[in-house]
Amino acid sequence: MLIELLLIVAVGFFAGLVNAIAGGGSLLTLPALIFLGLPSVEANATNRLAVLVQSFFSVLSLKNSGISEFRLSILPSIFAVLGSVVGFWIAIHISSQWFNLTLSIVMLLIAFLMIYKPKAEFIAKVKHKNPVAAVVFFLLGIYGGFIQAGIGVIMLILIPVLFGLNLVHSNFIKVFVNFVFTLFVLILFAYGGYINWESGIMLSVGMAFGGWFGSKWSVRLGHLGIQRVLVAVLVIMSARLFWISFIAV
């Protein structure tokens, strides 16, 4: 048990490092919790605790750095919370086998998005963007309530186009919305008794330290180098999830 907890801290540390430099750390922590023996729904719920902690400190860090978009974050947060209720319902009713398959496919898609970074020009042609933003964030909320992993990558593709912001200010909306709907979904998971608090706390500690070191090492390590490692790990973990779900049964 002690070895498993130390492994969780180590995974959290690496995920926090990746989040600080390239983004997408939860794509590592969620399958790692499954590989370490947690049932899929419990791993999904437990992972939210670390996401919440890191999102909270990310919001504070950006605000202290003079980056704040609270007003623009309200509408997306409301619709993301509404969507997250639907996503939560899916998360607790889907079988572990199909959850793992879905996560495996999502990991490959996010790896593709991280490499090619589509610009979503089609949204730029829409004149009335508030209704579009409401629909987009409702759908993102469904995904966030269901899996959450990799949602930051998707939001950073869409937010600059929807709100006409640079990536720095878009990142504030991303982490704020992520914090709000994650808090809501975490309460629902906690009420249902799905969270492994011991693992969640250890994962949060690891991610906190990883995020701190990542911010210090970001220039030395480089975004591209970490991103290549992350993409390789995502492909390997995706194959492993598919294997344990549909072949080694």
Image (spheres, rainbow, N blue to C red):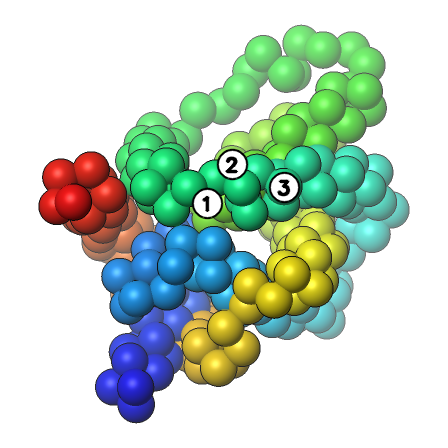
Please name the residue shown 78% across and 50% down the image.
69
What amino acid is labelled 2 in the image?
Answer: Ile
Q: Answer yes or no: is residue 153 visible.
A: no
Q: Is residue 199 left or right of residue 124?
A: left
Q: Is residue 120 left or right of residue 56?
A: left
Q: How crowded is mark 2: few (under 14 residues within 10 Å), some or many (20 or more)?
A: some
Q: In this view, does 215 lie to the left or right of 109?
A: right
What amino acid is labelled 1 in the image?
Answer: Gly
Q: Which of 31 and 122 is in front in this view?
A: 31
Mark 1 or 3 closer to N-term? 3
Q: Answer yes or no: is residue 34 visible.
A: yes
Helix, strand or loop at mark 1: loop
Label 2, on which residue? Answer: 154
Residue 37: image location, x then y, percent: 30, 66
Residue 175: image location, x then y, percent: 64, 54
Q: Distance between the residues labelled 3 and 2?
A: 22 Å
Label 1, on which residue? Answer: 150
Please name the residue shown 71% across and 31% down the image.
138
Q: Nearer the viewer, residue 158 or 86?
A: 86
Which residue is at the far right?
A: 71
